[in-house]
Image (cartoon, rainbow, N blue to C red):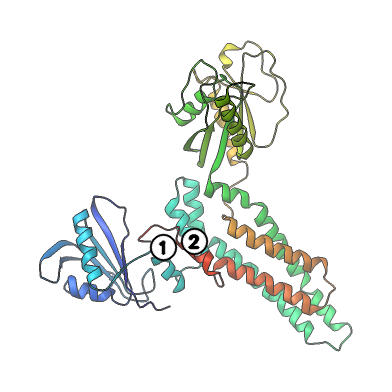
């Protein structure tokens, strides 16, 4: 797709730096090199240039690289300038480019142009956005897989199989006057539809793991007052993030800490102790604690190990029961409890092992990593389930349903996508990407 405007932005991080990368893309990109850098030079070769303004004054010295279309990230003519990362250099460069008729790029506009030029599909663009936001190794690996086309390949494989099934159904339509032939031909499509349906169902079932890697896991630490919830949070965080006191009810609001545990992005929530109280402020904190626990992906329920009334626990899904202050208990813990001392570290290795097992329990990366992916594939599953359940209806009806499924796969990789969806995806990028 041809754009009349040429855009520019700083593609490296903001602020002062030894070197800053400035990117220019569009039909006038080469003219920028001619006008300010004394020529374009050889394609894809870095060269030392003096950047001079129209009055001949020197703006800066640095490296310039010329990427003529279509061999560039955006598919357009692209220029990269590696200059000193000075606010004064950036400000004057942007003034000069604006005066030359260039336009400051919007968030994600370079990647949007790459998508429109067919350099990457929509699922790959989402992978790139996730890679830029990756905080953990698991997020980095999953994002690179998406950028490399993991979801795109899966969608194309499904699409190829559905086209085979559609060919049988359309062939059956070509024999309207024969009694048995249309049905016999249509039935040959069913094994393929069933195989694709099974694969899609498995992908949806595994999607929670991929979304947990991308979005992170919320872990609520809950339990009665003064059992050491804040001490457990501080030890997990490796620093004092919550106030610790022997006085019950110190924590009155939810304290959130982001960190990486077992290669997973985790938001730990330290909550107010749950108990009966007449204190209005405490009641608000307790209500928030209950809400946080109910909405969390995983719960750490903490109790006092010295409490003789600790009972056997029946394991609840995504819940870890921890008896703190284990160094003060002589009796063996009832079944279902993990004993620790947040103060001395006793039992901590076992606690961390159990927590990591819960965080990693749903498996590794999946091909469906966003709500958008899951919604589209779930919709395709519903359509294919109808096809399989009503295999003996007219071939025209089945062919129409399979075509609907194909349209959902096209939307998955961006062959057909509503403008508002594109806007939401590409606006999530930083300026300069």
Q: Which residue is mark 2?
A: 425
Q: Quadrant of residue 302?
A: top right
Q: Is residue 190 left or right of residue 293?
A: right
Q: Which mark is residue 77?
A: none
Locate residue 155, reporting x and y percent.
Answer: 60, 66
Residue at x 23% of width, y 59% of height = 90
Pick whichever, 75 or 6, lies toward us: 6
**Residue at the spot x=64%, y=21% of the render?**
276
Q: Residue furthest left?
A: 56
Work out which quarter of the rendered image holds the C terminus and state it. Answer: bottom left
Is 71 situated left or right of 234 in this image? left
- Relative placement, left or right, of 303 versus 122 is right
Q: CA distance from mark 2 to mark 1?
A: 9 Å
**In the displayed structure, would residue 185 be above or below residue 212?**
below
Residue 254: % across, % down: 52, 32
Q: Secondary structure at mark 1?
A: loop
Q: Nearer the viewer, residue 208 or 8?
A: 8
Q: Which residue is mark 1?
A: 108
Circle 1 packing at 10 Å, graded few (<14), some (14-19), many (20+), is many
**Residue 41 visible, this angle:** no
Neighbour tally class for label 2: few under 14, some 14-19, many 20 plus, Cα within 10 Å: some
The answer to whether the residue labelled 2 contacts the one labelled 1, judged by CB atoms less than 8 Å apart, is yes
Residue 342 locus on image (x, y percent): 51, 21
Q: Quadrant of residue 229?
A: top right
317 relative to 339 in the view: left or right? right
Q: Is residue 211 visible?
A: yes
Residue 178 placed where, x, y %? Answer: 87, 87
Examine the rendered structure and indicate whether residue 47 appears above or below residue 88. Answer: below
Q: Where on the picture, by quarter, is residue 305?
A: top right
Tag 1 or tag 2, which sits nearer the N-term? 1
The residue furthest right is 179
């Amino acid at each position: 797709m041809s754009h009349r405007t040429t855009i520019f932005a700083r593609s490296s991080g903001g602020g002062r730096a030894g070197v800053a990368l400035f990117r220019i893309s569009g039909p006038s990109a080469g003219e920028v090199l001619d006008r300010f850098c004394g020529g374009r030079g050889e394609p894809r070769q870095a060269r030392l240039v003096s950047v001079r303004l129209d009055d001949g004054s020197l703006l800066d010295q640095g490296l310039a690289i010329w990427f003529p279309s279509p061999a560039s990230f955006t598919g357009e003519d692209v220029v990269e300038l590696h200059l000193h990362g000075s606010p004064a250099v950036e400000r004057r460069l942007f003034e000069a480019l604006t005066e030359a008729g260039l336009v400051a790029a919007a968030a994600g506009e370079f990647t949007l142009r790459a998508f429109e030029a067919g350099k990457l599909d929509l699922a790959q663009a989402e992978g790139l956005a996730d890679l830029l936001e990756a905080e953990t190794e698991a997020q980095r690996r999953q994002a690179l897989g998406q950028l490399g086309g993991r979801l795109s390949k899966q969608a194309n494989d499904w699409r190829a199989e559905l086209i085979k099934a559609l060919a049988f159904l359309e062939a059956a339509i070509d024999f309207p006057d024969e009694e048995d032939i249309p049905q016999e031909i249509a039935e040959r499509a069913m094994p393929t539809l069933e195989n694709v349906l099974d694969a899609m169902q498995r992908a949806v079932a595994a999607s929670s793991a991929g979304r947990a890697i991308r979005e992170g896991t919320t872990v609520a630490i809950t339990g009665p007052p003064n059992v050491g919830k804040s001490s457990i949070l501080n030890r997990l965080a490796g620093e004092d993030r919550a106030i610790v006191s022997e006085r019950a009810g110190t924590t009155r609001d939810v304290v959130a800490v982001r960190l990486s545990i077992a290669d997973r992005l985790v938001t730990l929530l330290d909550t107010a102790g749950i108990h009966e109280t007449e204190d209005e402020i405490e009641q608000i904190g307790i209500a928030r604690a209950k809400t946080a626990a109910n909405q969390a992906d995983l719960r750490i329920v903490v109790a006092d190990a010295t409490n003789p009334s600790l009972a056997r626990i029946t394991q609840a899904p995504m819940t870890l029961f921890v008896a703190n202050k284990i160094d003060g208990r002589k009796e063996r813990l009832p079944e279902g409890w993990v004993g620790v001392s947040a103060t001395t570290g006793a039992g901590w290795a076992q606690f961390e092992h159990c927590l990591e097992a819960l965080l990693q329990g749903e498996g590794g990366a999946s091909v469906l990593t966003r709500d958008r992916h899951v919604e589209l594939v779930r919709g395709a599953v519903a359509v294919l389930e109808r096809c399989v359940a009503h295999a003996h209806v007219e071939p025209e009806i089945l062919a129409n349903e399979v075509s609907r499924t194909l349209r959902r796969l096209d939307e998955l990789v961006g062959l057909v996508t509503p403008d508002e969806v594109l806007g939401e995806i590409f606006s999530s990028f930083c300026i300069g990407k």
